[in-house]
Amino acid sequence: MSEGKTRVSILGATGSIGASTLSVLAHNPEEFEVAALVAQRSVERLAQIALQTGAALAVVADERQFADLRDRLWGTGVEVAAGRDAVIEAAARPADVVVSAITGYAGLRPTLAAARSGAHLALANKEAMVAAGGLVRAALAQSGGQLIPVDSEHAALFQALWGQDRSAVTQLILTASGGPFRTWSKDEIAAATPAQALRHPNWDMGSKVTIDSASMMNKGLELIEAQQIFDVSHERLDVLVHPQSVVHSLVAYRDGGQLAQMGVPDMQTPIAAALRWPRRTRTSVPPLDLAQYGSLTFEPPDRERFPCLLLAETAMRSGGGAPIMLNAANEIAVSAFLDGAFPFGGIPRVVEAVLEQGPSGQAPRDPKVTLSLEEITAIDAESRARAHEVVSEMI
Ligand SMILES: NC(=O)c1ccc[n+]([C@@H]2O[C@H](COP(=O)([O-])OP(=O)(O)OC[C@H]3O[C@@H](n4cnc5c(N)ncnc54)[C@H](OP(=O)(O)O)[C@@H]3O)[C@@H](O)[C@H]2O)c1
């Protein structure tokens, strides 16, 4: 990373992670400057933050919004562009850190472009890692860029592994809040409405990841993300429900000790760590006052009431195309649920149906072999088509 100001690009600048990143930057104006900002279609907000941060470039993925963005930033000196290729170019622009925070599989190609650029990759977009972790890691290895996780659990694991004897690690334990339905019965969960599922007890996040938290698919995706980021076997990964979201994850070592990273649940903390790692940056997050919490509680996850977790673990063990299918089916099912015409209990059923079918025309292969982008794209497309069919059958 260069001396002086750290140049930051934010892919998904108008979202929840984008907002937390901008808060960190606003706290430390002497430390950062903005290279590029990317959004899908929220041009009013994009133009506003481009002006506030003095960004060099603002890109909107939806080309229909180009004229609006151009007019809003006319004469300001901010370069503007639109379209999917422009998003890729923004991701590849010279920067010290690229925050990858587009939601879903749509973030994969921009994330790969950032990984190829040699910048540090501050990764929030877990779906990219689930679908194509091998490709992202290979791109980073080739460019010399470093992946620094932003997802709070992976940020915690990253910090608890830093400088430690990796051969002595016995387990990576991801904590989970349990979401809004932690104490609900299976039938109550199956009949939950979007409004109920969007009410997360501890975290204020975008709608997709909030629904995933309610189904615990989020934790399943995070297990696969951890497998990819830390290159560990699935046997060494586990989940622990911790409703207060203060302990963000733990690493167990063979001497019997465990290292945890803790803090008030606020994404500014892992983002701040990722932006200048291993240096620490100020945030507006209050210090953790454990006395105020009084007690922290822990319990095992219930895979019977949260079958999405079990499905993700099965996909993780299978490897190969299974995580891609899991992710694609889940994105379609979550979107149908958010549209209001599809039950919450249908989400695991769609995922299961797609996983059962398996990718067509593919000979069984070693799950450790990295799939090409073309293969990943084909499996993703086929899984989405199948998921749409299953959703239609269930409505
Ligand atoms: N929020 C959290 O606390 C949190 C925590 C850990 C991990 N994550 C992960 O971080 C990622 C982002 O989550 P979020 O909660 O910040 O989501 P979000 O609030 O929905 O924001 C998504 C951002 O991505 C942009 N975007 C969506 N599709 C795009 C496309 N095709 N091309 C370009 N930009 C696109 C959106 O632009 P528009 O505003 O124009 O739609 C928005 O800026 C997800 O993978 C999530 O799992 C989030």
Image (cartoon, grey):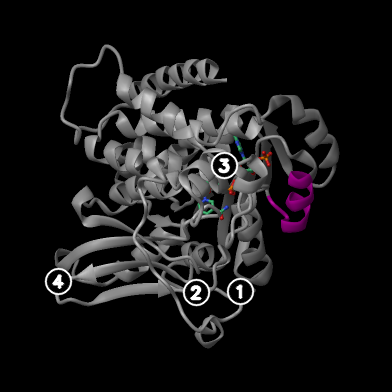
* Circle 2 residue: 263
* Circle 1 residue: 285
* Circle 4 residue: 254
Task: Name the residue type under label 4.
Answer: Arg
- Name the spot of residue 249 as percent of width and height, x first: 37, 65
Alpha-carbon span between mark 2 and mark 3: 24 Å
Question: In the rendered image, which quarter is residue 392 located in?
Answer: top right
Q: Are marks 2 and 3 in contact (CB under 8 Å)?
A: no
Alpha-carbon span between mark 4 and mark 2: 25 Å
Q: Residue at x 69, y 33 (%)?
A: 81
Question: Is label 2 in a helix, a strand or a loop?
Answer: loop
Q: What secondary structure characterizes most of the magenta part?
A: helix
Q: Front-most of 50 and 184?
A: 184
Q: Are marks 3 and 4 in contact (CB under 8 Å)?
A: no
Can see residue 94? no
Q: Is mark 3 within 8 Å of ligand 1?
A: yes
Q: How many neighbours does mark 4 have within 10 angstroms: few (below 14), some (14-19), or many (20 or more)?
A: few
* Circle 3 residue: 208
Q: Earlier in the sequence, mark 3 or mark 4?
A: 3
Q: Residue at x 49, y 15 (%)?
A: 389
